[in-house]
């Protein structure tokens, strides 16, 4: 490692994003992994996928061994100027970016109206079948009562 600490900007580092010229930013440090592309046990493609961004999470997610961490020193070429690293985008949930309020309102209205409609339907169906039942069975009931009284009296 040289005595002079080279500080790179994010823009400079991001330019090295090819198989034959690949730089990574991991934990605030910059690595030129070009000579390691073919030998990296995880493959060169994954190293490429970590270019143009802060690759710390990608590197740590794998759970690299101590050997891998020692190996990194060979490729160290300086520090990253943290000020130049773009901030992570904040996640905006879909409902906040949606401006289709009319359809949202309609869905809410349906959610309210459909159960009411079903309830009304159920009540009217019950009333209807109750009437039908009474009309059908009340003469039978009357007759059986008469028959019962008659046989009892005998
Ligand atoms: C200078 C940087 C890096 C070095 C020196 C390095 C070194 C190594 C070494 C030695 C291994 C073998 C397993 C171990 O000992 O942990 C390995 C595996 C691996 N590395 Fe890296 N690596 C670097 C960066 C990265 C980055 C940035 C990624 C992700 C984008 C990555 C993804 C992987 C994957 C997927 C494996 C395979 C794990 C497996 O199959 O078990 N590596 N790396």
Image (spheres, rainbow, N blue to C red):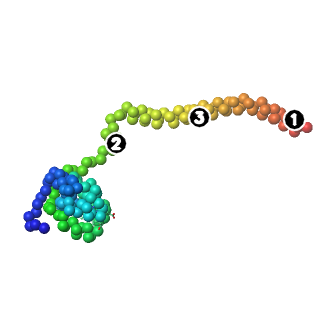
Q: Which one is earlier in the sequence, the residue at label 1 or at label 2?
A: 2
Q: Position of residue 134 (x, y in %)?
A: 71, 31
Q: Position of residue 27 (x, y in %)?
A: 21, 61
Q: In the drawing, what numbered circle is on residue 94? A: 2
Say if 111 sits above or below 26 in the image.
above
Find disc 3 in the rendering and name its residue.
122
Q: Which one is earlier in the sequence, the residue at label 3 or at label 1?
A: 3
Residue at 46% across / 36% down in the picture?
111
Q: In the drawing, what numbered circle is on residue 111? A: none
Q: Comparing marks 1 and 2, which lies closer to the viewer?
A: 2
Q: Comparing marks 2 and 3, which lies closer to the viewer?
A: 2
Q: Which one is earlier in the sequence, the residue at label 2 or at label 3?
A: 2
Residue at 23% across / 63% down in the picture?
36
Find disc 1 in the rendering and name its residue.
150
45 or 11: nearer the viewer: 45
Direction from residue 91 to residue 152 in the image, left or right:
right
Secondary structure at numbered mark 3: helix
Give the quadrant of ligand 1: bottom left
Residue at 24% across / 60% down in the picture?
37
């Amino acid at each position: 490692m040289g005595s002079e600490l080279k500080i790179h900007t994010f823009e400079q580092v991001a330019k090295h994003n090819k198989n034959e010229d690949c730089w990574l930013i991991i934990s605030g440090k910059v690595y030129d992994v070009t000579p390691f592309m073919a030998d990296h046990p995880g493959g060169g493609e994954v190293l490429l996928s970590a270019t143009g961004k802060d690759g710390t999470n990608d590197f740590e997610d794998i759970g690299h061994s101590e050997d891998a961490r020692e190996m990194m020193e060979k490729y160290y070429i300086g520090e990253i100027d943290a000020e130049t690293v773009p901030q992570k985008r904040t996640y905006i949930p879909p409902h906040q970016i949606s401006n289709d309020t009319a359809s949202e309102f309609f869905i809410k209205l349906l959610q309210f109206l459909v159960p009411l409609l079903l309830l009304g339907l159920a009540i009217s169906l019950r009333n209807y079948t109750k009437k039908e039942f009474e009309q059908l069975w009340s003469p039978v009931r009357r007759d059986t009562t008469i028959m019962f009284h008659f046989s009892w009296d005998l």
